Amino acid sequence: MEWHEQPYNNWTESDVGSWLKSIGIKEIYITKMTEEEVTGPVLSTIKREYLSSTIGMKSAQIEHLLEKRDELLKTNQPDTKKKGEFKGKRREKEVLVSSR
């Protein structure tokens, strides 16, 4: 499954790298983040200081990455409503079956 077909919290280092490339982050930083084992869950909590000191990223790249990451977090949330609806329908079916 491709990175864009799954929630960010399931992303591997490779998926994060593909996403970083798609938003225009320089290859040198993508390589470093892969080496540092930045997965989707890590990406969701990564801080400016880490990007600067550990990855060596410059300010403009950091600002761009953090803005795009925040957009991603807002739009790529697990859909809990569907899970709840499924459970509700399942319960309704169980009630119907048990009442027969």
Image (tube, grey):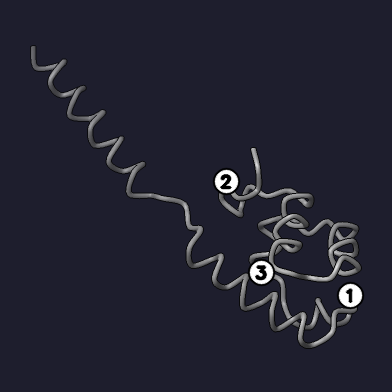
Please report whichever mark, 3 or 1, sits nearer to the chain's N-terminal start: 3
- Distance CA(mark 2)–CA(mark 3): 18 Å
Q: Splitting the image into 4 quarters, where does residue 35 fall?
A: bottom right
- Distance CA(mark 1)–CA(mark 2): 28 Å
- In-image side of 28 versus 77 (left or right): right
Which residue is at a point 49% across and 67% down the rendered structure image? 74
**What amino acid type is highlighted by mark number 2?**
Gln
Percent coordinates x, y for residue 84 in the rendering: 31, 43
- Asked whether the residues under the numbered discs 3 and 1 touch, taking CB atoms below 8 Å apart as contact, a structural biologist would say no
Percent coordinates x, y for residue 55 in the rendering: 88, 73
Label 1 belongs to which residue?
54
Label 3 belongs to which residue?
45
Q: Splitting the image into 4 quarters, where does residue 1 fall?
A: top right
Q: Along the line of sight, which residue is nearer the eye, 12 or 23?
A: 23
**Marks 2, 3: nearer the viewer:** 2
Percent coordinates x, y for residue 32 in the rendering: 90, 64
Residue neighbourhood size for the residue with mark 3, other residues' Cα within 10 Å, grouped as few (<14), some (14–19), many (≥20)? few
**What amino acid type is highlighted by mark number 1?**
Thr
Which residue is at a point 83% across and 56% down the rendered structure image? 37
**Marks 1, 2: nearer the viewer:** 2
Which residue is at a point 57% across and 73% down the rendered structure image? 70
Residue 6's disc number: 2
